[in-house]
Amino acid sequence: MIIGAGIAGAGMAYRLAPKGSVAVLDMEAQAGYHTTGRSAAFYAETYGGPKLQPLTTASKGFFRAPPEGFSEAPLQGPLGAIHIFREDQREEADAALAEMSVLPGVRVLPAEEVLRRAPYLKPDMLTAGIDDPDCANLDVAALHQGYLKGAKAHGAQVLLESGLESAVYEGGRWQVKTRTGALTARVLINTAGAWADQVAERAGVKPLGVTPLRRTIVTFKNPQGLPFDRHGPVIIDVGEAFYFKPEGEGYMVSPADETPSVPTDAQPELEDIAVAVDHFERVTGATVEKLEAKWAGLRTFAPDRAPVIGFDADQPAFFWSVGQGGYGIQTSPAWSALAATLVLGEDLPEELKAHGVRPELYSPARFR
Ligand SMILES: Cc1cc2nc3c(=O)[nH]c(=O)nc-3n(C[C@H](O)[C@H](O)[C@H](O)COP(=O)(O)OP(=O)(O)OC[C@H]3O[C@@H](n4cnc5c(N)ncnc54)[C@H](O)[C@@H]3O)c2cc1C
């Protein structure tokens, strides 16, 4: 029984349904209502650092060539990223370049080349950029729906508006109470994102101390007079103070905020919206007249900001798949494959081994 039908729960259901009897519960009427439906939807291979990177790299093959019939739409599209920096950010740029240099095609772009590819940037706002040509746009809805459709085709039940209220382990089974009724399960899988600790507590399992961090996004039409390229790259400040990418006829901008929050239906705060717009206006010199949309979501991190994937050290029928942070979409194919392997007690798939995925790095036992 999987608790949470976001990308983490849907991915697990997809991997496990062919091998057993699977139910996925979500408290909302719509799967993907929380963080999964609120992401910036891109794939940046070294984003998140060395513990995340093997899972991201090992997911690339699935995004490029998903299994037959998985999705009618392609799961990824070209985007490209340029990490811009000023002279006073040289140290951060060197560190970013060192981390990214494991990727093909990564190189420093002189300012003239950055400005040729992104003519909307103000020349005095950058010294140079780092090119990451492999950064891709992801179709989160196609991925999420593909997982759910595939899971249902193998008999998985997806139960919406069925939040877990309590779970008691007795006689080798979980007795689970939900808003809509009682169920039993051999194993509980916690993919509840920001609510991961709450779900653990409701099952009598010691929480890990995860922290949901709010992140904001705004969208607007391209300001009048500013050159625009709908196929342009995502522009990322090397210190991650902000990023923006073309979206429709304009931009999607995030101030890359990380404000601690309780698990909740996150809403954007006026101050974060203003900071997002201010960053965009400063680096382009343009004026944003009117926002089209604004939203916020919770990126949830374990205390060491690394993934948590494995059975609980004290309750062996309780499995954690949490702490996806800001990388839960781009890592999801490999993350779900690894998590399913551990649930089933199978050997690590060769493809994951080949990309350097080491399950011991993610064990929840490190917090006990
Ligand atoms: C602004 C923003 C930008 C991002 N950009 C990117 C990006 O570009 N690339 C990337 O890879 N990632 C990105 N992320 C991160 C990514 O969106 C998350 O890592 C991922 O969506 C987490 O998925 P999840 O399934 O763990 O959580 P969620 O989607 O939140 O799913 C958890 C589910 O658990 C359910 N639940 C909670 N409690 C219960 C209960 N008691 N019973 C039943 N169900 C319950 C909830 O209703 C929810 O549906 C971004 C996130 C944000 C907010």
Image (cartoon, grey):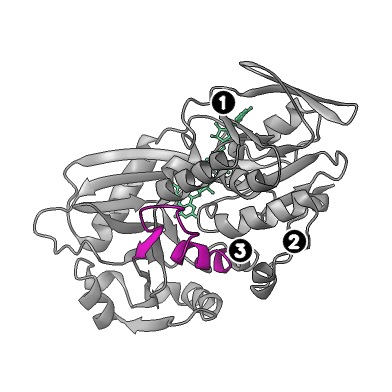
Residue farthest along the right direction in this orientation: 171
- Quarter of the image for the N terminus: give it: top right
Which of 298 and 312 lies nearest the eye of the viewer?
Answer: 312
CA neighbours of label 3 inside 10 A, class few (<14), some (14 to 19), many (20+): many
Q: Does 362 sit above or below residue 105?
A: above
CA neighbours of label 2 inside 10 A, class few (<14), some (14 to 19), many (20+): some
Q: Is mark 1 within 8 Å of ligand 1?
A: yes
Residue that carries the numbered disc 3 in the rendered image: 55
Any mark on residue 359, and which?
Answer: 2
State the image coordinates of residue 167 (x, y, percent, origin top left). Answer: 76, 24
Q: What element does badge 2 sit on?
A: helix
Q: What element does badge 3 sit on?
A: helix
Which of 135 and 279 lies nearest the eye of the viewer?
Answer: 135
> Does 64 lie within the magenta span?
yes
Which amino acid type is shown beneath numbered disc 2? Pro
State the image coordinates of residue 194 (x, y, percent, origin top left). Answer: 59, 37
Label 2 to label 3: alpha-carbon separation: 10 Å
Q: Is residue 222 left or right of residue 9?
A: left
Which amino acid type is shown beneath numbered disc 1? Met
Mark count: 3
- The residue under the point 62% across, 37% down is 192
Which amino acid type is shown beneath numbered disc 3? Leu
Marks 1 and 3, the one that precedes in the sequence: 1
Label 1 to label 3: alpha-carbon separation: 28 Å
Q: Which span of residues is magenta-colored?
A: 55-78
